[in-house]
Amino acid sequence: MPPFPQSFAETSRLGRCVIYILWMFPGAVVAQTDSTHDFGSQVSPLIESYCVNCHGDKKSKGDLNLEAVLRSGSVAENFKTWEKVIDMVEYEDMPPIEEEDQPSEAERSRFIATISETLTDYIQQNAGDPGKVALRRLTSAEYAYTIEDLTGLDLNMEKSFVGEAVGGEGFSNVGEVQFMQDSSLERYLEAAKTVASHAIIGAGPLSFYQDPGKTGQELSAINRIRGIYEKNGFRTGAGEGAKAYGTKMYTKAFYVAWRYRHRRERDDAGITLASLAEENGISVRFAEHIWSVLNQRAPSFPTSNIVSAWKALPDPGESEVDIRRECAALYEKMLGWQTTLAASTQDDEEYPVLTTEPFQANQSHSFAVRMNRAPEGSDLEFEIRIQAADSSEAVKPAVLWKNARMQILPAPGGETYDKPLRELVTAETANRLKFGVGKNVGPNDFISLGQQQLTIRVKEPAEMASMRCIV
């Protein structure tokens, strides 16, 4: 046995492992025998003449140092590098024609042939190494990643498979330890059925859906229904992050109705609502509905306000761009009425629908606002805004705020209780609100006149965690 190397303790852990293997099994490492008896004599001069200016020790463009590669003494260890060199020389990409001297055709052919023959000799000498490789299947994780790559879906397929065995190297993709039994094959077949259930196969491209429902066809039908709604319906918004769609339908419908109204002045006598609707991408029934509402004899409020604004649109002499802009402004006006008159002004799902039905206003309505604790040393504050449905100065709405109170929500363990608002507001707020002043006004009531914004400041009870103002 050879003497143990003295420098063993001074090497790294990986280095010590390598030294130990070489010391114990000196025959385990077989020297590479490149058939390079004339490799250096034929290749090195050409490298020195045409390559080292850019790919040598002094300059290594593209991180390629051919002088270092030559010094390694083995073509096989650097076969990938030499394959790239062969391609560059064979296709005359290197040396650059504009910048460097070029080898002759004979030199180029000899250079390519010498490297190619050396690589071929090495391949023939090591044929059969590392020996027979067992056919292996995909591991559960590889199968899942493959399905995701093919379909774009994360279906968690690996959870239905049997756990993987691990080979001596610590890997689960070693063919010798992988097995396939009847139950495993059945699981693979079930997985294939699951993937197929997400697929829609028809005349068009193959598509996969994340949620298949009972069948892929069922989900396809759901998507078609949703497409119909998105094409022909509209929604200003919805909860849980749903997106608005179809918001330009009213703008287009107002424009279609305007075009139809002025068809004679525009020399469009033969045009119809149906053709205009199709031209502008809206349904015929929707265009007909808008036309009927805009042309009723005695529209109710606030529809009458929208009808008046539509009839006041410019004459056909205006540009198409200006008319469409006016129609968009008319939709915003209608949306503003919807927001103003909605039962909940923050409910985006109360759609703006232009109808012939009269508007019915409620004579009373309850409001509530919740407040958390204010920064130390300051009062709580909230605002009440009163806006008239008719924006003219002649209208001054009067609102009686009855039994205004604060609902105190104490810290956990305490009991919720109510307290009149007048007992908690600051003196300045109490003077402005004038609780109990007026005919048939209770001690906890106050009256507001006209369109205004009331700022209400409240002294914070010491025991509160939060509280609600209810009027």
Image (cartoon, rainbow, N blue to C red):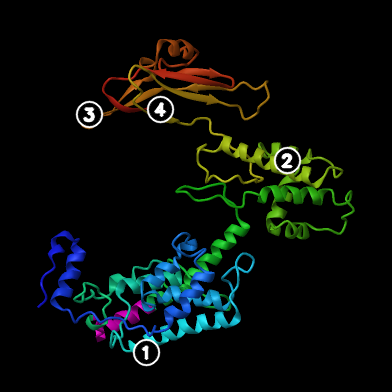
Which residue is label 3 attached to? 414
Residue tagged 2? 307
Q: Is mark 4 on a helix, strand or loop?
A: strand
The residue located at (55%, 76%) in the rendering is: 89
First-in-chain label (1 vs 3) = 1
Identify the element where label 1 is drawn: helix
Q: Are marks 2 and 1 in contact (CB under 8 Å)?
A: no
Q: Are marks 1 and 4 in contact (CB under 8 Å)?
A: no
Q: Are marks 4 and 2 in contact (CB under 8 Å)?
A: no
Q: In the shown orientation, is residue 224 left or right of residue 7?
A: right
Mark toward the start of the polypeptide (4 vs 2) = 2
Amino acid type at circle 1 is Gln
Gap between marks 1 and 3 measured at Cα: 88 Å
Q: Which amino acid does label 2 sit on?
A: Val
* Residue bearing the label numbered 1: 124
- Local packing at callout 3 (Cα closer than 10 Å; few below 14, some 14-19, many 20+) is few
Marks 2 and 1, the one that precedes in the sequence: 1
State the residue position of label 4.
470
Cα–Cα span, label 3 and label 2: 56 Å
Magenta span: predominant SS is: helix
Mark 1 neighbour class, 10 Å CA radius: few under 14, some 14 to 19, many 20 or more:
few
Relative to the observer, which residue lies in front, 126 or 109? 109
Q: Which of marks 1 and 4 is nearer the N terminus?
A: 1
Q: Which amino acid does label 3 sit on?
A: Gly
Of tags 3 and 4, the one toward the viewer is 3
The residue located at (90%, 53%) in the rendering is 267
Q: Is residue 445 above or below residue 153?
A: above
Mark 3 touching mark 2, by CB under 8 A?
no
